[in-house]
Every structure is written in structure tokens, then in C-alpha cells.
């Protein structure tokens, strides 16, 4: 597929109604692909919007049900050229801490079931959406794609991190034993339209936006000095597809250039929303790693577009949130999707 357009290709996307998966469906359809979108939960408005796109078909399939997934592949095969695996159980820091076993079990079983089908039904390529957290650990900073810090895995009670690490390891083992072509994509913190803006699935940027728009206070765990990098969701999708098209690299870090402290992030969001800055830090609560910096030199060597800056992405995300909130109050409404489709 390297060097070819997506026109005429058939691509199966898991988590097709989720935050990231729905953007893959849109971009692939716009690129001329036939898209088979698998989803577990139902989001009627989003299903209607995505299902109306040319070449898109959506199917309710539970990846945890091995027999159901194999039945779906048997129906689609041998026409699938590539699989993009976006489905994952995720959430905010509190949800990850209190649902660690559920997250690890769910994410590992869905990835294992999918890899088995990719192997058994002869799918040529798999794009695995991993995470920058799979490379977390001791080692040089910024972290490159090749630095195997996860190979010296230490004991962890974070089921999400473990699921991403073991998911990568399993995919690499499938590649070595069965010849499955795997493209690993490791995004840092992803944000943008259709993310979850409330509840236990809400990540840091949508949570901050939602609280400020509601006139509430932002609470930052730790002292606020911890830094993170971010990536706008459509930039992640475009970079992932160009990784496959080029065939040049087996793995790719995806993030905006630079990093920002949590305290400064809250201030930027307040400026973009035009809301009064109401921020409280809680040093007694765990703030996570002091820094998570990814080396993005490969990304900028590969892609043919300029990624949005953090501020540009925040402007677009706030605009979508306000439009969506207004639509929720209309007779038709527009649902806000969660992180797992």
C-alpha cells in the first residue's frame, strides 16, 4: 500500500463511533476508501452522520466476543486491505486508577481477538493505536520510537499503561511469528471534537473546557508544574495514514512540538474560552510524571502537512464544544461521543 492512495482500498476501523475512530472513518472516506466501521456502543446521531458518508458501512460488533468478531471477519474477508485498531477502554486519572483491572482485561482481550482475526483472514496491514505511555519509564528524554524503555517494565498498578505496553508486545510477536505487518502509532495526549466532555471518560483538555464553560473551578492535581504535550485528533489521523502510505517506518510518535505545564494549559484554555481563570492546585493529589516528552523528528520528516498548534487546536475544540452544546438544546440534538466506540 506504500505510495498508493486509499482510493479503492477497504479499511476496517474498530471503535468507529469513538473519539479517534470516528475521525479515521471520516478521513478514510474522504480519501476514497471503503470503510467498514465496527462499534460496540450505539450513538444514533453520529451513526447517522458517519453512515451517510460515501463508502462507509457501520456494524455493531463486540470485540470482546471472539466468535462474533470472527463471524464479522468471515463476512468481510478477503476484501480487507488494512485494519485500524482504535477501540480501547480509557478514562481520566481517577477512572484509570479505580478500573485498572477492567481496562487491562478489556484492552488486552480486544487486541488479542483482533490480531487473531487479522492473522487468520490474511489482512495485510494493521495500524495499532498505542500511546506515548507505552514508552514511559526511565531513559533519555525526549523519547524516540526505538528506545525500548518498556522492555525493563517495572511493577505497575496502571492497567491502561500495561494494556498499551502488552498490546504492543503482542502485536510485535504476531509480526515476528506470523508475518503480520504492524504499524505502531504512539500519540501523546489527543484532544479535539467528539471527545468526552464530562464524566469519568473526560481527559484533561475537555474536562478543563467543560468546567470553565460551566463557570466551575479547574482542579489540578499536583503543583501544576508537570508538563505534557498534545496532538489535535485530525493531525493524529493524517499522520497515521501517511505512516502507512510511506512504508518508511514501523512506529511513529505523534505530538505537537514542545510541551506545556498543566497550570499554563489551564490559563491558555481560559484565554481561548474568554472565561474567568479559576484554577486551584492540589499538591496532595498525585500529579503523575513530571514530564512526558516525545521525540517528533520522525513525524516532521514524514508528514506533508503542518500540524495545528496547541492554541489553534484549542480554538477549534472550544468552537465544536459550544456548537455541540447548542445543538443538544435543539429538538434534534447532537450527541457527544465517549472515548470507546
Image (tube, rainbow, N blue to C red):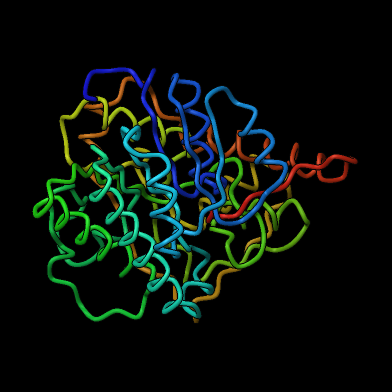
Seen in the picture, residue 23 relative to 134 is either above or below; the reply is: above
Seen in the picture, residue 81 relative to 214 is either above or below; the reply is: above
Q: In which quarter of the image is the N terminus?
A: top left
Asked whether 23 or 6 is in front, the reply is: 6
Image coords of residue 293 (percent x, y): 29, 52
Rendered residue at 48%/39% (across/down): 233
Q: In which quarter of the image is residue 320?
A: top right
Rendered residue at 25%/66% (across/down): 166
Asked whether 291 or 92 is in front, the reply is: 92
Seen in the picture, residue 249 relative to 262 is either above or below; the reply is: above
Asked whether 83 or 204 is in front, the reply is: 83
Q: In which quarter of the image is residue 333?
A: top right
Rendered residue at 22%/44% (across/down): 182
Rendered residue at 27%/40% (across/down): 123
Q: Quadrant of residue 58?
A: top right
Seen in the picture, residue 54 relative to 51 is either above or below; the reply is: above
Q: In this view, does 8 lie to the left or right of 203?
A: left
Image coords of residue 229 (percent x, y): 39, 48
Image coords of residue 111 (percent x, y): 34, 59
Amino acid at each position: 500500500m506504500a505510495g498508493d492512495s486509499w482510493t479503492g482500498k477497504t479499511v476496517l476501523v474498530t471503535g468507529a463511533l469513538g473519539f479517534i475512530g470516528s475521525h479515521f472513518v471520516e478521513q478514510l472516506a474522504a480519501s476514497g476508501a471503503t470503510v467498514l466501521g465496527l462499534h460496540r456502543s450505539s450513538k444514533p446521531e453520529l451513526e447517522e452522520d458517519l453512515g451517510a458518508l460515501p463508502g462507509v458501512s457501520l456494524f455493531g460488533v463486540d470485540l470482546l466476543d471472539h466468535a462474533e468478531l470472527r463471524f464479522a471477519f468471515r463476512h468481510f474477508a478477503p476484501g480487507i486491505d488494512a485494519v485500524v485498531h482504535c477501540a480501547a477502554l480509557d478514562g481520566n486519572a481517577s477512572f484509570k486508577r479505580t478500573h485498572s483491572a477492567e481496562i487491562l482485561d478489556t484492552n488486552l482481550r480486544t487486541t488479542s481477538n483482533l490480531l487473531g482475526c487479522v492473522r487468520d483472514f490474511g489482512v495485510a496491514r494493521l495500524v495499532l493505536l498505542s500511546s506515548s505511555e507505552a514508552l514511559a519509564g526511565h531513559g533519555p528524554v525526549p523519547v524516540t520510537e526505538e528506545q525500548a524503555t518498556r522492555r525493563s517494565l517495572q511493577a505497575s498498578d496502571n492497567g491502561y499503561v500495561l494494556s498499551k505496553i502488552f498490546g504492543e508486545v503482542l502485536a510485535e510477536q504476531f509480526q515476528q511469528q506470523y508475518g503480520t505487518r504492524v504499524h505502531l502509532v504512539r500519540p501523546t495526549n489527543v484532544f479535539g471534537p467528539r471527545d468526552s466532555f464530562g464524566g469519568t471518560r473526560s481527559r484533561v483538555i475537555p474536562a478543563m473546557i467543560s468546567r470553565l464553560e460551566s463557570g466551575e473551578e479547574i482542579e489540578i492535581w499536583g503543583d501544576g508544574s508537570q508538563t505534557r504535550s498534545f496532538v489535535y485528533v485530525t493531525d493524529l489521523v493524517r499522520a497515521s495514514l501517511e505512516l502507512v502510505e510511506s512504508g518508511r517506518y514501523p512506529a511513529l510518535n505523534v505530538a505537537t512540538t514542545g510541551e506545556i505545564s498543566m497550570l499554563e494549559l489551564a490559563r491558555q484554555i481560559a484565554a481561548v474560552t474568554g472565561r474567568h481563570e479559576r484554577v486551584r492546585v492540589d499538591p496532595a493529589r498525585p500529579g503523575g510524571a513530571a514530564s512526558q516528552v516525545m521525540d517528533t523528528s520522525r513525524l516532521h520528516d514524514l508528514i506533508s502537512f503542518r500540524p495545528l498548534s496547541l492554541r489553534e487546536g484549542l480554538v477549534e475544540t472550544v468552537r465544536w464544544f459550544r456548537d455541540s452544546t447548542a445543538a443538544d438544546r435543539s429538538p434534534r440534538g447532537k450527541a457527544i461521543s465517549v472515548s470507546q466506540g
